[in-house]
Image (cartoon, helix red, strand yellow):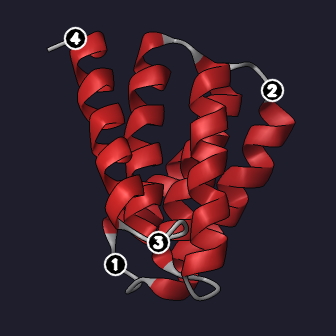
Amino acid sequence: MGEYSKALSSYERALDIDKKVLPPNHPDLATDYNNISMVYDEMGEYSKALTSYERALEIRKIALPPNHPDFAQSYNNIGMVYDNMGEYSKALSFLEKAHEIDRKTLPPNHPHIAQSKRNIED
């Protein structure tokens, strides 16, 4: 609906609640940071989006096993922000990591594999 300030406020409230009731590196906190990042990304505030996406990735590195599919989401999102910022070599590096994890962790016909490949091609 384009109501970014309302979305941001709701996601930040969710993060505040989760911080009070969950351990500091719980995967749900990564989801909260990811959601906040998506709003900043849509608003064109790429540096803020990148900061929150990177925080989500840090939490996932602590909370999840290596090559967990959620890493692909983090790498893809960070790559797309770099793409939006015109930093194409950084974008490519993250998008390739996302695609590699997708290929290793998902069934061969999973749509995320095709999407991550398209992101690299674009």
Judged left or right of residue 21, residue 94 is right
Q: Decide which of 48, 24 is in the foreground and name it.
A: 24
Picture disc at residue 23: 3
The quarter holding residue 43 reads top left
Q: Which mark is residue 87?
A: 2
For badge 4, the amino acid type reads Gly
From the viewer's perspective, is 94 left or right of 44? Answer: right
Q: Which residue is drawn at 66% across and 52% down?
A: 95
SS under mark 4: loop
N-term-proximal mark, 2 vs 3: 3
Q: Distance between the residues labelled 2 and 4?
A: 26 Å
Foreground pick, 63 / 87: 63
Residue 4 in the image, given as x and y percentages of width and height: 29, 14
Alpha carbon separation for disc pair 2 and 3: 34 Å
Could you tell me how far apart the alpha carbons at marks 4 and 3 are, in whole angstroms? 32 Å
**Residue at horizontal 41 percent and vertical 34 percent from the top:** 36
Residue 90 position, x and y percent, is: 82, 40
Contact check, label 2 and label 3, Cβ < 8 Å: no
Residue 122 point in image, percent of width and height = 60, 36
Q: Which of marks 4 and 3 is nearer the N terminus?
A: 4
What amino acid is found at the position of numbered circle 2 in the picture? Glu
Residue to which mark 1 is pinned? 109
Image height of 11 relative to 2, above or below: below
Is 64 situated above or below 52?
A: below
Q: In the rendered image, is residue 45 in sight?
A: yes
Q: Which amino acid does label 3 sit on?
A: Pro
- Say which residue label 4 marks: 2
